[in-house]
Amino acid sequence: MNKGRVRLAVLLALVAALSFVAIGARKVATKLAKDAAQKVYVPPGEYDEFYAFLSGGFNGQLSVVGLPSGRTLKNIGVFSVNPRNGYGYSPETKPLLMTSHGFLPWDDTHHPELSMTNGVPDGRWIFINANNTPRVARIDLKYMETAEIIEIPNSAGNHPSSFVTENTEYITAGTRFSVPLPQRDIPIDQYKGNFKGTLSFIKVDPDTGKMSLAFQILVPGFDYDLAHCGKGPSKDWCFFTSYNTEEAHTLLEINASQHDKDFIAAVNWKRAEECIKEGKYETWHTPYAHNWYDEKKHMAFSEIIKEEKVIKPEQCPGVIYYIPTPKSPHGVDVSPDGRFILGNGKLSATMAVHSFEKMLKAIKEKKFAGDAYGIPILDYDAVVDHHVKNVCLGPLHTESDGKGYAYTSCFISSEIVKWKWETGEIVDRIPVYYSVGHLMIPGGDSAKPWGKYVLALNKITKDRYLPTGPELNQSAQLIDITGDKMQLLLDFPTLGEPHYAQALPASMIKDKQAKIYNLKENEHPYATKSEKDVKVVRKGNEVHVYMTAIRSHFVPDNIEGVKVGDTVYFHVTNLEQDWDIPHGFAVYGADVPNLLIMPGQTLTLVWKPEKPGVYPFYCTDFCSALHQEMQGYVRVSPADANPPMIWRGGGKEGKWIVE
Amino acid sequence: MKKYLGYALAAGLVFAFAFAAKCEIPAKMPPPGLPKGIGPYAKKELKLDPCIDKELAKKGEKLFEQYCSACHKITERYVGPPLKGVTLARSPEWIMNLLLNTEEMIWNDPIANALLQQYLTVMRPSPDMTEEDFRAVYEYLRYVDATDQVKVK
């Protein structure tokens, strides 16, 4: 055997060995992928285990997503108009988007929070905040539609919202962008001392869910970032993080990152209630809107309220304390047993786990390190219980699994870190793709989490999916947390930026879902409950069409007598009483989207025709084999014409009623 | 013995005639032996009174207007077939089965399925309707067939 042959043999052997190793590795990877696939596979016709509710961020909606499959089940229009069903365009839904600044078609949704009983999601409602023009919405979990929106006066950048107390007594709201309060015209460089924030508490009626602004606490002009309320021993308190305790008004990136510690504001809402009762508050008169949807009348209403109760901390000692926390903390999270309050110090690699018990003791013993505009600052060492050291870079938020573990999202190092609440000991890490913001475990901020999965809500997507030009959807990742090691199961894109999310077992609300609106109970003033009640009514320049829709015709389907200058109201009632048979309605040239009318529901499309002609209208939702035939015409005559005022449909012809 | 039987028969006939005479609106009965379809009435009989129950028909007329008329007319085709004559062409059991067990009937009963193929729209009785309500609508349709009137007077 010569040297060359030996070399060749060695080389061949090496290649064979290497390829064996490579094949082995691939086999392991395939096996893992298969294992993960089985865990998220929901066979055709079967249901997901959890309903998840993902905020839509700058898209302004709330997405309903099934877990573990990641399938989007519905997008609910909340603070943004929704062309799918005409939400925010129809006169029935438009009042929901009214504010003290008039009608607003958009906002930025951030933190959904399920209503709770005894600290556990109860499946009644879900709340969500609007960050831009401060508001909080309530979504009914039976209809999965927006039921109510309340504006928050004396605020801006409503970010530490909409977190609820243990029994949904209150929802939090607060000021991320402090402003002159009351609002006035002053130079921006006079920020310090003149700009203020408020921490607001919205009362929730335990039976109806109706929201009302209970009180606002006037606080120094820091940036109040996130919140969570206590439970168990800490149930009477809510906690708000703050940054920019420097009170910078420009280049905050640098100027608001000077202090080693900022504050968690601990608010005793029971104490606030006492002060309200004792009259220790000021009445302010900043107008704000309160809007609600009447399920029976199928219509939303809006009112402007001009009175709010403002508590100044100096008038109500004991209502608020500041807990120093490193550094520009973002999320504040409470352990399931309510004993620990965690500041996720965005700019610090070490997180402080505060003890609620120690906090009470420090307050009692007056262990203060000074005050900020009269608000006592508690001594850090007297309140902190332990630290989670070198947790990661950019810790933002923490959720719990109910088994003693906490899971922290890390924005800069793109990972989730699992650690023990009691000791701060880190036990596992998993990379996420990329730059995770919030994370969510079903019930993970409640007293009893369903600790099966954690959902990473990532800010940056990059190469995770087929590229779609410069703009990419955000990305969520589902991770199994039932074992010692976290296991990545699934990636799926999301609509808008899902800041925070909530989830609960599907079994809690699945069977309570409304399937139809009961036609008998429809009290819409323009409802047409039977084809024999169809009519067209002229009131001056207003034309009201009382229209019905059923597979596969509208009555009327011919309308003549409309003139340029008229405003036509198509009040369409869907006569179906069968699940999942909505009818759509669109008119040629209308400047509003279509209506999607649920069975038994009445909705209105308003149309101002501008040119004479004959214009078709049709059903936009494929409803039956004769859906294509579900169409009609409206004739528009010149303003000075004198056309016959008639309608046809359902084999009948009728004359208009002129009032 | 035979004699007594004869008397009894005669008395029975007299009684029947007297009863029939009291019938304000005598019903027209469907011929016997019509198929019953699939559903809760497949194996039982719906006993029909030879007289129309006008009150019940009146209730049925109202329910028909509210729940059925968007798809059915009496004398003309609409979304579904015209309903005049239906109580003579189909057994009462078949009609009740169609109303109470629609989904199975339209796919598996040969007559109902042929109608689906002809009209191409899936029939959906209102979920608000009870068996009693359906029976009232049936009485209304019986009234229509007995009197040739669409309105119960």
Image: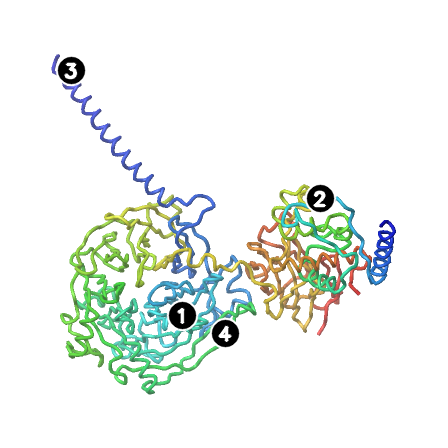
Gap in angstroms between the C-alphas marked 3 and 1: 80 Å
Q: Are dots 2 and 4 in contact, CB under 8 Å?
A: no
Q: Are marks 1 and 4 on the same chain?
A: yes
Tags 4 and 3 in contact by the CB under 8 Å rule?
no
Nearest-to-viewer mark from 2 and 3:
2
Quadrant, the N terminus of chain A? top left
The residue under label 4 is A302
Same-chain check, marks 3 and 1: yes
Name the image quarter holding residue A214: bottom left
Mark 4 Cα-neighbour bin, 10 Å: few <14, some 14–19, many ≥20: some
Asked which secondary structure carries label 1, the reply is strand
Give the residue number, with chain letter if any, for mark 3.
Answer: A5
Which residue is under mark 2? B35
| Label 2 Cα crowd, 10 Å radius (few <14 / some 14-19 / many 20+) | some
The answer to which of marks 3 and 1 sits earlier in the sequence is 3
Q: Which residue is pictured at 83% across the width and 56% down the height?
A: B12
Crowd rating for badge 3 (residues with CA inside 10 Å; few <14, some 14–19, many 20+): few
Spatial distance from mark 2 to mark 4, Cα to Cα? Answer: 58 Å
**CA distance separating discs 2 and 1:** 63 Å
- Name the foreground residue: A32 vs B9: B9
